[in-house]
Amino acid sequence: MISRNFKNVLVVSIGFLSLFTAYGGLQSLQSSLNAEQGMGVASLSVIYASIIISSMFLPPIMIKNLGCKWTIVVGMACYVSYSFGNLYPGWYTLIPTSVILGLGGSPLWSAKCTYLTISGNVQAAKEGKKGADVINQYFGIFFFIFQSSAVWGNLMSSLIFGQDNKIANIPEEQLQSCGAADCGLNISGNSTTIRPAQELVWTLVGCYIGVGVLAMIIIAVFLDNIDRDQANQFRENREPFCQTFLATFRLLKDWRLLTLIPLTMYSGFEQSFLSGEYTKNYVTCALGIHYVGFVMMCFGASNSVCSFLFGRLAQYTGRATLFCLAAVANLSCVIALLLWRPHPDELPVFFVFPALWGMADAIWQTQTNALYGVLFPRDKEAAFANYRMWESLGFVIAFAYSTFLCLEYKLYILLAVLVLTIITYPIVEYYEHKHPTKPIEQATYQSHKETIETDESRIICQTQM
């Protein structure tokens, strides 16, 4: 039988799947669609810089006033605005909409994480299970559905732009500079980097706007407002503005959060490397830009399946074992990328790296989100705001040095951050093992549970799983 909490997890997941089918597709195309004066990459930098700023103060304020549901809807509207900016791309349209997206990005993700954590704790209390186990399962289900957006977004762009696709003719001289063999800063363009026909661009962006609006409708209509009572109570008994405004920074007093910063920033470093450096210096350089979509589809499929799998396995293996697996996978990939010289004759190898990277990223995403929910159950909004802030800082730093550091040095930086993560994360895990964080009091969600029981008494039948 499908519980009401599980239904809400599915609604959130499908909403994010629809939204990021649009945004993920646009993000992977920015460097080629809006290559003039580096406008596309600049817009991505502005997005993550804005997310850092919004993480400092917006999530606690919005979630406590609007509740998780309507914070998610408002955040999704900010993402859709970026799609509108891509209809007529220019500095005057992309940069303002990038700022809007960034400001809505942190509240959106913080609200999602808070919602899943609340749902997991409520369901665990009803079933007499550990809250951490149910939260892990819910995050695994979410990322299983959400990460498949990389498949659908890139499939849409491949099908639409495929009508105007020219097969690249990669000269042998360029193959000599692919990978870490050369600096990688001056990868020459080829015929496939020409901007597609404007009509096809409008068709694609129009489809992305449509699925983005659909995501807002799904959340607004089908998602339960589980923290409505808490939001109403907050508005009636309003805390001092400074107290809410500084909630994100107050949590930095907790040494556990400070120790998790390398792990959180590494998530931004590793995601930006695959979508930016790997696609440019290995795939586009040796195969042509028309293969980027297929490679990212492989990454998305691997990420999606592994997110679901590891979300289930976590209760048996523990987080530490999975984090160790992700670290070994990324470490192996980085060393191999330093040594490998990509060539079109080795086509399957180009898909091995994103498949392994997707498996590792599934662990970083699901387990880090779940870890924050377990460690900071009474400061969920501020904790997940910190998560978005530090992860986005990793993105911004990676984008900042992308244009002037050689690929070899970028791989060494990625390796250094990974090693630092391997050193710092076990400290928090060991402390949590010795001094487990008490789960949130069941009474906190009592009013919501009573509402659920009342609603479920009116349900005539439920779907059999």
Image: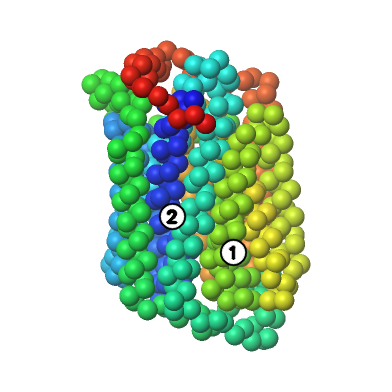
Instruction: Say left or right for 218 vs 350.
Output: left
Residue at numbered disc 2 = 21
Identify the residue at horizontal 41%, vertical 39% (top origin). Answer: 12
Residue type pointed to by label 1: Val
- Position of residue 77 relative to residue 137, above or below, is below
Given residues 356 and 224, the one toward you in this image is: 224
Q: Nearer the viewer, residue 92 or 297?
A: 297
Tell me the kind of residue under disc 2: Thr
Q: Label 1 to label 2, Cα distance in Å?
A: 16 Å
Q: Is 164 placed left or right of 406 in the picture?
A: left
- The earlier-in-sequence mark between 1 and 2 is 2
Left or right, 192 with reference to 412: left
Q: Which residue is mark 1?
A: 295
Residue 451 visible in rendering: no
Residue at horizontal 39 percent and vertical 47 percent from the top: 105
In the image, residue 428 lies at what x, y percent?
A: 64, 31
Q: Position of residue 45 (x, y in %)?
A: 44, 60
Relative to 199, is 260 above or below?
above
Callout 2 secondary element: helix
The one nearer the camera, 226 or 320, is 226
In this view, 2 is above or below 82: above
Q: Is residue 340 above or below residue 195?
A: above
Q: Secondary structure at mark 1?
A: helix
